[in-house]
Image (cartoon, rainbow, N blue to C red):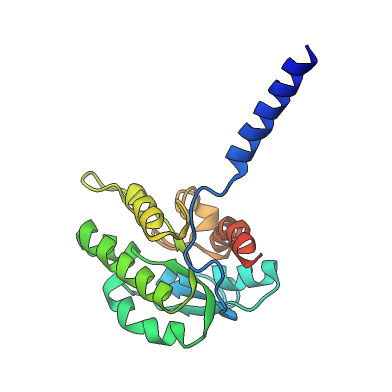
Amino acid sequence: MNRKVAIAVAAAALLLLWFLWPSRTITNRDSKGTTVVAFGDSLTAGYGANAGEDYPSQLSRRVGIPIINEGINGDTTESALPRLPDVLSHNPRIVIVGLGGNDYLRGVPIATTEANLRSIIRQIHAGGSMVILLGFNFPSLGANYGKMYERVADEEQTQLVPDMLDGILSDPTKKSDDVHPNGNGYAVMADRVEGTLKRLMR
């Protein structure tokens, strides 16, 4: 009986280890960078909120380190590409990439968005930084955006924070207009990134 118990305990321990083991290899986990940069569009810039209510500012206060905000209203994945030298000039350890919403609103084919995201991530990786990719589920009959972000994160070896706007734009208390959060909504976004950022910082 004791042997059976020992085997059961060992099996349970192995199962727990399997569940807790990191499920995704992260490129540049040993990054020597010294900063954290949030790179994106109006959702990063904080459109619709008061100064200091954008998600990078709220996230910075939670984790206790400065986060450089490189968000520009209206940026697409294509228009963001030329800005990468500015992002990398900050010597980032981690770059939080939040792009794709304006591609969707402007009817850019999802394949183009995916290709641009991959190019952005690969250039950041080539610069020696880790990437946290923010995922979005934009409503579309012909394209699954959530799966696209998952695929990119898996294949490019980045950490994914999925479905960043879930429950925000459907709640009037968390949005400033039809496509942007307010300070309360950006607080939810900061919540969703906080745990992932802390894990990578460790």
Quarter of the picture containing the C terminus is bottom right
Residue 89 against residue 98 in the figure, above or below: below
Looking at this view, name the residue that lies furthest to the top.
1
Residue 47 in view here? no
The residue lying toward the viewer, choosing from 31 and 98, is: 31
Residue 187 in view here? yes
Residue 5 against residue 124 in the figure, above or below: above
Looking at this view, name the residue that lies furthest to the right.
2
Residue 73 against residue 18 in the figure, above or below: below
- The image quarter containing residue 83 is bottom left
Quarter of the picture containing the N terminus is top right
In the rendered image, residue 198, in percent from the top left (x then y), is placed at: 64, 62
Residue drawn 24% across the image and 48% down it: 143
Residue drawn 54% across the image and 66% down it: 29
In the rendered image, residue 34, in percent from the top left (x then y), is placed at: 60, 81
- The image quarter containing residue 126 is bottom left
Give the total of numbered labels.
0
The residue lying toward the viewer, choosing from 24 and 64, is: 24
In the rendered image, residue 100, in percent from the top left (x then y), is placed at: 33, 63
Left-right relation of 50 to 3: left
Residue drawn 60% across the image and 76% down it: 52
The residue lying toward the viewer, choosing from 117 and 130, is: 130
